Each structure stands twice: as C-alpha cells, then as structure tokens.
Amino acid sequence: MALPKGIQKILIGVTVKTKKAIKWHDLMIPIGTRGVIRKVESGGTVAIVEFDNKRYGSFECWFSELGPG
C-alpha cells in the first residue's frame, strides 16, 4: 500500500531498524540493523535506508521490512 505524499516527506530522516534479515546476492543485513530513511520511492512503498553500519551503505527496503528504530 502506497503512503500519501505528506507522510512520505515526514518519514525522511526517521530512524528505523530491520524487522527481518535482508539477503540480496552477497549482502546480508541482519535483523535489528538500524538506519535512517533518506528517500521514499515507488509511490511510497519503498524506502532508501542509509544504515548506521557503513559496511551496508544505503539499501532499498520495502516498508514492511522496517520498524521503528
């Protein structure tokens, strides 16, 4: 479900953490990894998260994979 544009703007800069492990090719981001939302894309269904652990950098996550940080 897409988020309204007003909500999308409010979420930029919010601290979040992963609710489940993210596995993509050789990248493995464990449960509970904290990061900050830097951008909202795909009509409000996807967040670009910059993780605190610089090893993970920024990654595109579904909002369903994220929880409050």
Image (tube, helix red, strand yellow):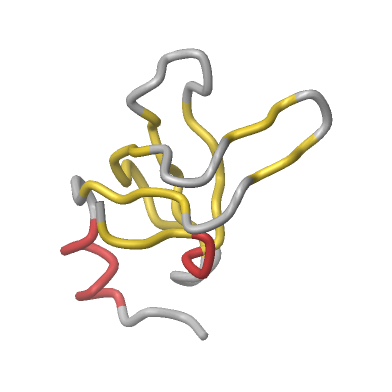
Q: Residue furthest front?
A: 31
Where is residue 13 drawn, in percent x and y? Answer: 19, 45
Above-or-below relation of 32 to 9? above
Where is residue 10 drawn, in percent x and y? Answer: 16, 63
**Count of picture labels:** 0
Q: Residue furthest right?
A: 25
Above-or-below relation of 38 to 11? above
User: Residue 29 appears in which quarter of the rendering?
Assistant: top right
Above-or-below relation of 3 to 39? below
Where is residue 3 drawn, in percent x and y? Answer: 38, 79
Q: Residue furthest top?
A: 55
Q: Is residue 62 left or right of residue 69?
A: right
Q: Is residue 6 left or right of residue 5?
A: left
Q: Which residue is depicted at the point 55% across and 64% down?
A: 42
* Front residue of this view, candidates 55 and 45: 55
Q: Which residue is depicted at the point 23% across and 74% down?
A: 7
